Amino acid sequence: MMTPTDPARYAGADLRLAAVDMDGTLLDDDKNFPPGMDELLDQMDARGVTFAPASGRQVWTLIDMFPGRPGMTVIGENGGIVMRDGVEVSSHPVDTPTVREVIRLVREATSGPDGIDGGLVMCGKQFAYVERTADRFVDGVLPYYHRTKRVDDQIAIIDAIEAGEIDDAIVKLAVFVLGPVEALAEATLANFADTHQYAISGANWADLQVRGVDKGSAVRDLQRFLGVDRSQTAVFGDAGNDLSMISEGDLSFAMANASQDVVEAARFIAPSNNEAGVVQVLRTLLG
């Protein structure tokens, strides 16, 4: 574990935006929020500083995680969509031919007696759509996608979106496996790694979205929307999918528990996620 940076090195900055990863960064290892979070957010609101949680989770899940805080700004789907006060700031839908082919490949890889025990989560702006509807599968999806719809046919959903019968757009494709994800990911999403943004995003998850769309691009979208620059932006992360975001703020913090590549990319080291490191640093930045 790294030694946190002396707070004197970053105190007194002109902070206007804080983009903060969730798991391993803001949340402790038991997925709990740090003590003092509500008071900190009240202080940030009073000072006109935007707090933006950034996650692979659905935007509606992120909003639900901060109850009683109207006007939240959230970066969801690893940058696939950014929302502020319930209004879309930016989004980047996946092309329909790719969505259709991924549906076909996942069905093929998960069917029959030798099929992989997983399924496709079709991540829309409004809802996540799953056609694998068994409770044990959906129960694994719901913590990350609070607005999940069980459907008979994902292709029919795409047809309805294209026809204007459903007001939605697919911003990310995710495969979830009740076990290690690699085999299903390689059989499906990895086929598009040359043309799209592909990543193993957890032990049981892999993602596919538009090339060039990530947490970093979302922070840039938000900076333009808010009229702030990188010198006024703090970013916090711990893992590889935070690297693109780390590069968009001059006040870049790797958590003390972060992977080495994040530590090397960041300017400063924050106390670990289990020591409320984000809250400690933001309090110092706010003076």
Image (cartoon, rainbow, N blue to C red):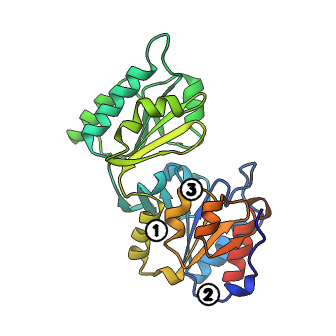
| Mark 3, secondary structure of its residue | helix
Mark before the other along the chain sequence, 2 or 1? 2
Residue nearest the observer in this picture, 66 or 6: 6
Q: Earlier in the sequence, mark 3 or mark 1?
A: 1
* Residue situated furthest left in the rendering: 163
Q: Amino acid at mark 2?
A: Ala
Please give left or right for residue 254 compared with residue 208 in the image. right
Q: Secondary structure at mark 2?
A: loop
* Residue 176 position (above or below residue 68): above
Q: Is residue 21 left or right of residue 275?
A: left
Residue 227 in percent (x, y) is at 41, 81
Residue neighbourhood size for the residue with mark 1, other residues' Cα within 10 Å, grouped as few (<14), some (14–19), many (≥20)? many
Q: Earlier in the sequence, mark 3 or mark 2?
A: 2
Tag shown at residue 113: none
What's the CA distance linking mark 3 and mark 2? 26 Å
> Residue 232, position in %: x, y?
53, 82
Q: Mark 2 — residue? A: 13
Q: Classify 196 as above or below 183.
A: below
Front residue (pair 127, 13) = 13
Residue at 35%, 30% in the rendered image: 103
Picture quarter with the N terminus: bottom right
Q: Which mark is residue 219?
A: 1
Residue at x 75%, y 48% (from the top left corner): 30
Q: Quadrant of the C terminus?
A: bottom right
> Could you tell me the amino acid type at mark 1?
Val
C-alpha distance separating marks 3 and 1: 16 Å
Disc 3: which residue:
240
